[in-house]
Image: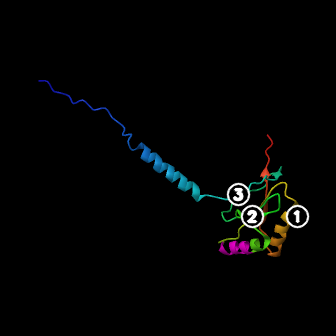
Amino acid sequence: MYIKRNRRKAFVVPTSSMSDVAFLLLIFIMLVSLINYRREVNIEYAQVTEQIAPHDAEENIEIWVDKDGMVYLAGEKSDLESLQRDFIAALNTASSTPRVHIIADKNTHFEHINRVLSLLQALNYNYVSLVVKETRSF
């Protein structure tokens, strides 16, 4: 007696929905990338040669000073009066004591940075860091 074997059909990957999947992945990646959006001011960092202990905190307040002396708080252009008002508002909404990072262009005249430091001193705020770029010597 002869038993007839069933031949298996060739496996086929359905490609008709591949473009839909790729489109959904593209939308997902675009939305996720907007979640961690951070506005930055284009500056050249000052450089440091010795090792400094890093400070990791999620609620840091960043004050940017460009080479023309313009001041930015969290990427928004600001003058000293609105900087003081917005800084106090940011302190009130913070759950812990945030560190203030002053990020200045390396060509910024120090009097522009000193205006920001004087404002923080007038507010009696002590947790201030000047952000610099580390140079690596290999």
Q: Where, by quadrant of the figure, is residue 82 drawn?
A: bottom right
Characterize the local packing of mark 2: few (<14), some (14-19) or many (20 or more) Cα atoms within 10 angstroms: many
| Residue found at x 58% / y 59% | 35
Q: Toward which corner of the image does residue 7 lie, by quadrant? A: top left
Q: Give SS at disc 1.
A: helix
Residue 59 image point, x, y percent: 67, 65
State yes or no: residue 43 in magenta.
no
Which kind of residue does numbered mark 1 sit on? Glu
Residue hosting label 2: 72
Report whether 16 appears left or right of 4: right
**Of the numbered discs in the image, which one, if any, rests on residue 138?**
none
User: Badge 1 is on which residue?
Assistant: 111
Give whichever of discs 1 and 3 has the lower sequence position. 3
* Mark identifier at residue 40: 3
- Of the pair 13 and 82, the residue shown nearer to us: 82
Measure the alpha-carbon separation of dots 2 and 1: 16 Å
Please report contact status of discs 2 and 3: CB closer than 8 Å, yes or no.
no
Task: Count the marks.
Answer: 3
Crowding at dot 1, Cα within 10 Å, few <14 / some 14-19 / many 20+, comes out as few
Q: Secondary structure at mark 2?
A: strand
Instruction: Give the magenta range.
Output: 85-93
Q: Is residue 121 above or below residue 72?
A: below
State which tag comes first along the sequence, 2 or 1. Answer: 2
Q: What's the residue type where badge 2 is placed?
A: Tyr
Nearest the eye: 126 or 101: 101
